[in-house]
Image (cartoon, rainbow, N blue to C red):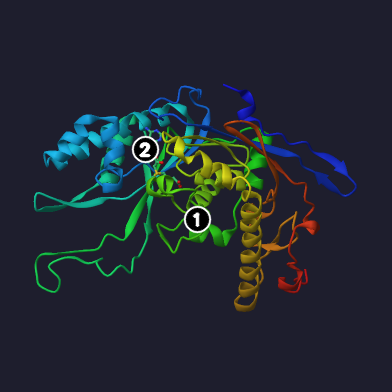
C-alpha cells in the first residue's frame, strides 16, 4: 500500500499576519471487485460512503446474473425470493470487507432503496434495506439512526395497483434509505493535531439542524455528465450533495473515505471538495472516461459549493439577526458571526488544482487563502457588528 495515499500535508508557517496552509489529498481508483479490497490495510479507513447495485431492481439483474449464474436461473424460473437472497449474497462479502478496513469508531453510510416487482402475478416489496441491516449486524456493525431520503416523483404511474377501488392499491415508493453504521465504540480524537483538524472540520449550527434531520428532502446537484449510453445505463449516481454532506458529517479533513461501489465517482469528488482522501472500487471499467472528465470541473464545483455554504451562512446570520439577535460568537478565520463556540475555528479549504500522478490516481492541492481573499464579498451581508 502506498503510504502517500494517507498523506495529508499541512505546513504552517508565519507569513506576515496570516498563516500559510499547504494541503494535498490523494484519490485512488481500482477497477476491480470490492469483494476483496486487499490493497487496503485493516483498520485504516475512517468512513465508507456508498450505494450498491439494488437487488431486484431490473436495471441490475444482468450485473448480478453475470457474477452468479444461479441468479439468472432463479429469475428465469420465477423464484424471486431466491434471486433476492442470491443477489444479496454477492453484496455480503463487501460488508465484511468494510468492517475489516474501518478503524474502531469508523462509520459506514449505505444508500439503498427497496424494490417492488411483480413476478408470476405476485406483486411484492423486496426490502433491500432490511436485508443489508441484517448483514451489517452479522458483519459486526452497530446500527445508528438512519436517514430517509425522500425522492418525490411526478410520474403519472406513481400510484400502483387498483386505482380508486379498495383494497388492492399500493402506497408509492418515493424514498430511499441512508443506513448508518459504526464499527466499535465512538471515535476518539486524542492528539492536539487530531483535535485541531476536528475543530477546523466543524459545520455550521444551521447545517447541523438540516443535515442531522432524519428526512432529507430536495437533494439536488448531481455533477455527473455521462459519457456514453453504457455508463448512463449503469450509473444510478447519487447526488453530489448526498455524498458531500455525509463526508462532512462523519469524517474530518485528511481522513480516508472509501466507496466500494464507485460508479461515476461521486464520493471521490465529494471527498476532494471536503479535503478528504478517497479510494474507490468499481467493477465496470466503462466508468473510467466519465470519472476522468469530471476531474476538469471539480475545482470549480467544489469551490462553488464552499462559496455557497458561506453565502447560506451569511443569509442565515442576517435573518437570525433581524428576527432574534445576532449569533454570539465570531469565526476566527472569516470574522463572521457563528452560533456556537464549536464553529469558531471552522475553516474551508478551497481547491487549487488536480493532478494525475499515474493512471488511476488523482492528487488535489488546496489553496492558501487568507480570509479576505476568499472569492465573494460577504461584507454587505454581514449585520452590523454587535456593540460588545
Ligand atoms: C448504484 S451504482 C453506484 C453509483 C455511485 N454512487 C455514483 O454516484 O455514481 C453501483 C455500482 O457498483 C458497481 N459494482 C457492482 N458490483 C460491484 C463489485 N462487486 N465491486 C465493485 N463495484 C461493483 C456497479 O458497476 C455500479 O457502478
Left or right of 186, for residue 315? right
SS class, disc 1: loop
In the image, what residue occupies the spot 61% across and 57% down? 305
Q: Is residue 110 left or right of residue 356?
A: left
Q: Which of marks 2 and 1 is in front?
A: 1
Q: Position of residue 353 (x, y in %)?
A: 70, 44
Secondary structure beneath label 2: strand
User: Residue 320 appears in which quarter of the rendering?
Assistant: bottom right
Answer with the quadrant where ligand 1 appears in the image: top left
Res. 251 in view:
no
Q: In this view, does 144 lie to the left or right of 343?
A: left
Residue plotted at (68% across, 51% down):
348
Residue located beneath label 2 in the image = 142
Sequence-first tag of 2 and 1:
2
The reply to whether the residue tagged 1 has its Cβ within 8 angstroms of ligand 1 is yes
As drawn, the label of residue 222 is: 1
Q: Residue 355, percent across and down?
A: 68, 38
Amino acid at each position: 500500500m502506498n503510504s502517500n495515499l494517507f498523506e495529508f500535508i499541512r505546513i504552517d508557517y508565519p507569513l506576515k499576519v496570516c498563516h500559510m496552509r499547504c494541503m494535498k489529498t490523494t484519490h485512488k481508483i481500482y477497477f476491480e471487485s470490492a469483494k476483496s479490497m486487499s490493497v487496503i490495510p485493516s483498520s485504516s479507513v475512517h468512513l465508507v460512503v456508498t450505494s450498491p447495485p439494488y437487488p431486484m431492481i431490473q436495471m441490475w439483474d444482468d450485473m448480478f446474473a453475470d457474477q452468479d449464474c444461479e441468479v439468472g436461473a432463479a429469475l428465469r424460473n420465477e423464484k424471486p425470493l431466491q434471486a433476492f437472497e442470491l443477489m444479496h449474497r454477492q453484496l455480503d462479502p463487501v460488508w465484511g470487507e468494510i468492517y475489516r478496513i474501518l478503524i474502531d469508531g469508523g462509520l459506514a453510510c449505505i444508500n439503498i432503496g427497496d424494490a417492488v416487482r411483480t413476478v408470476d402475478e405476485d406483486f411484492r416489496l423486496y426490502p433491500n434495506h432490511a436485508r443489508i441491516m441484517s448483514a451489517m449486524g452479522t458483519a459486526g456493525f452497530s446500527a445508528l439512526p438512519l436517514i430517509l431520503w425522500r425522492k418525490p416523483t411526478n410520474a403519472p404511474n406513481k400510484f400502483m395497483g387498483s386505482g380508486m377501488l379498495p383494497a388492492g392499491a399500493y402506497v408509492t415508493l418515493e424514498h430511499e434509505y441512508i443506513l448508518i453504521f459504526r464499527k466499535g465504540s465512538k471515535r476518539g480524537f486524542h492528539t492536539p493535531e487530531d483535535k485541531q483538524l476536528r475543530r477546523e472540520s466543524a459545520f455550521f449550527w444551521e447545517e447541523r439542524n438540516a443535515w442531522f434531520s432524519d428526512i432529507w428532502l430536495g437533494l439536488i446537484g448531481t455533477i455527473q455528465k455521462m459519457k456514453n449510453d453504457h455508463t448512463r445505463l449503469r450509473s444510478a449516481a447519487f447526488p453530489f450533495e448526498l455524498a458531500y454532506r455525509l463526508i462532512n458529517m462523519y469524517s474530518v479533513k485528511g481522513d480516508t473515505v472509501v466507496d466500494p461501489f464507485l460508479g461515476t465517482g461521486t464520493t471521490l469528488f465529494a471527498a476532494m471538495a471536503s479535503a478528504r482522501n478517497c479510494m474507490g472500487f468499481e467493477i465496470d471499467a466503462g466508468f473510467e472516461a466519465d470519472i476522468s472528465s469530471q476531474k476538469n470541473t471539480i475545482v470549480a464545483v467544489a469551490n462553488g459549493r464552499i462559496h455557497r455554504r458561506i453565502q447560506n451562512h451569511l443569509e442565515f446570520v442576517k435573518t437570525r439577526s433581524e428576527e432574534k439577535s445576532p449569533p454570539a460568537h465570531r469565526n476566527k478565520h472569516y470574522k463572521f458571526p457563528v452560533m456556537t463556540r464549536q464553529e469558531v475555528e471552522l475553516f474551508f479549504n478551497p481547491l487549487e488544482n488536480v493532478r494525475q500522478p499515474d493512471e488511476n490516481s488523482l492528487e488535489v492541492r488546496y489553496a492558501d487563502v487568507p480570509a479576505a481573499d476568499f472569492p465573494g464579498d460577504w461584507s454587505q451581508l454581514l449585520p452590523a457588528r454587535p456593540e460588545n
